[in-house]
Amino acid sequence: MSAPSANAPVSPPTPTETLADARFGHVATEEQIQRTVAALGHNGMSATVVDSREEAVRAVLDLIPDGADVLDASSQTLVALGLTEAIAGATRFHGVRPEMMRLHQEGKADSVRKLAAAPDVIVGSVHALTEKGQAVIASASGSQLGPYVSGAGKVVWVVGTQKIVPDLDTAFERVQEYTFPRENERAQKVYGMPSFVAKLLVIHREFKPGRIHVVLVRENLGF
């Protein structure tokens, strides 16, 4: 079951899940997936639907041209799929994050910013996709948002279908009620400090058709 829609009511949560889990933590129905794919296409964004994590990894890597400079955005979806390591260790194209980390350690913040601003390809995820073909991404730093909007030559998002929601209002609820609490808990464990939603990006349409490609996975991936 997925997030609620007019003809898909949400069942009460089980004793081991919260109301947010019940609303936002279950993969979408086939009808919802197909509505979303069609709407994305109408809005200038292409989509591929796969059944497994293995297929998702292959689909993402196949979308990256030979010799491209590729930035992997910080994403628990990419971590879960092993794509962070796959991009960093690739030889067919150039993963730029290791170079960014080196520059960061050398205190060259401006060089890091410029390198991350306009990669040939950025690979990441979103926090909600609506059945009307809109994407919502929340961020604390906003570092991935510029490349998503226009800086990157190509954008590849890999998205678990539990992130499909009926509309933008529900997408914003998903960010606040489901995504943020989980990311905040992770940040406090990993970094010793809380997270926050500082910037929220909504993409309604893509000006250049096909620039944004969404790999939808029929699994629960990321937040």
Image: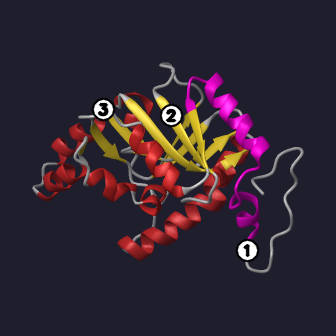
Instruction: Point out the stretch of residues depicted in magenta.
Output: 17-46
Q: Residues within 10 Å of mark 1 (few under 14, many from 20)?
A: few
Q: Report the mark closest to the observer, 1 or 3.
A: 3
Check disc 2 and report the residue beneath it.
213
Residue 145's label in the rendered image is none
Image quarter where the C terminus lies is bottom right
Mark toward the start of the polypeptide (1 vs 2)? 1
Residue 125 appearing in the image: yes
Give the secondary structure at mark 2.
strand
Q: Residues within 10 Å of mark 3 (few under 14, many from 20)?
A: some
Give the total of numbered labels.
Answer: 3
Image quarter where the N terminus lies is bottom right
- Magenta residue check for 35: yes
Q: In this picture, is 23 found above or below 141?
A: below
| Residue 173 percent across, percent down from the top left | 69, 52
| Residue 136 percent across, percent down from the top left | 57, 42
Q: Are marks 3 and 2 in contact (CB under 8 Å)?
A: no
Q: Is residue 100 left or right of residue 196?
A: left
Check disc 3 and report the residue beneath it.
120
Q: In this picture, is 88 found above or below 40?
A: below
Q: CA distance from mark 1 to mark 3?
A: 41 Å
Q: Residue at x 51, y 47 (%)?
A: 158
Check disc 1 and report the residue beneath it.
17
Mark toward the start of the polypeptide (3 vs 2)? 3
The amino acid type of the residue labelled 1 equals: Glu
Q: Residues within 10 Å of mark 2 (few under 14, many from 20)?
A: many
Q: Are marks 1 and 2 in contact (CB under 8 Å)?
A: no
